[in-house]
Amino acid sequence: MGLFQQGAGDDSRYGEIKMRLSDTESALICRTIAEFFGSDAGVSLFGSRVDDTKRGGDVDLYVKPNQCDDIYLRRIHCLAKLTAQLPYPVDLVIANETLSRPIDRIAVATGVVL
């Protein structure tokens, strides 16, 4: 299991966080997100893969893109590439800056920055 440092957020979550994702898988995700959404795009892992007490589960990714043109086409191509390269199902959520959707609030509150 890889260990990652939470990039920002409240102090209670800051520090080393265990994730059920290897360092290789994390790097692959970061490279693929950068390819489709820009090198400064933010990506966080959330859901069951950030909980060491859970088993299995898909890879839930929350992306804050820099390149917003053709965002849905970019999402589809990125998701296809990640699905082909990872041995788990992948969910890719594009950030909504207003946090009006419940999924945005959950991802921001519980996500671990990759």
Image (cartoon, helix red, strand yellow):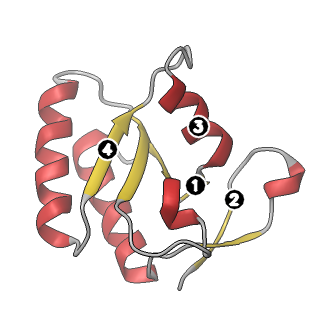
Of the two numbered discs 4 and 2 on the same chain, state the one appearing first in sequence.
2
Of the two numbered discs 3 and 4 on the same chain, state the one appearing first in sequence.
4
- For the point 19% across and 49% down, which residue is it? 79
Observer-side mark, 2 or 3, equals 3
**Above/below status of 69 relative to 22:** above
Q: Residues within 10 Å of mark 4 (few under 14, many from 20)?
A: some
| Mark-to-mark CA distance, 4 and 2 | 19 Å
Q: Position of residue 7 (x, y in %)?
A: 68, 54
| Mark-to-mark CA distance, 3 and 1 | 14 Å
Query: Taking 44 as reference, is 52 left or right?
Result: right
Describe the element under mark 4 as helix, strand or loop. strand
Observer-side mark, 4 or 1, equals 4
Q: Residue furthest right?
A: 11
| Mark-to-mark CA distance, 1 and 2 | 6 Å
Observer-side mark, 3 or 4, equals 3
Q: Residue 106's mark?
A: 3
Determine the image quadrant of residue 29. bottom left
Q: Quick check: can you spot residue 2? A: yes
- Amino acid bearing label 4: Leu
Q: Quick check: can you spot residue 40? A: no
Describe the element under mark 3 as helix, strand or loop. helix
Q: Can you identify the residue that label 2 sits on? A: 6
- Amino acid bearing label 1: Val
Q: Can you identify the residue that label 1 sits on? A: 113
- For the point 29% across and 23% down, which residue is it? 68
Q: Position of residue 104 (x, y in %)?
A: 52, 29
Of the two numbered discs 1 and 2 on the same chain, state the one appearing first in sequence.
2
Q: Can you identify the residue that label 4 sits on? A: 92
- Amino acid bearing label 2: Gln
Q: Residues within 10 Å of mark 2 (few under 14, many from 20)?
A: some
Q: Position of residue 57 (x, y in %)?
A: 38, 65
| Mark-to-mark CA distance, 4 and 1 | 14 Å
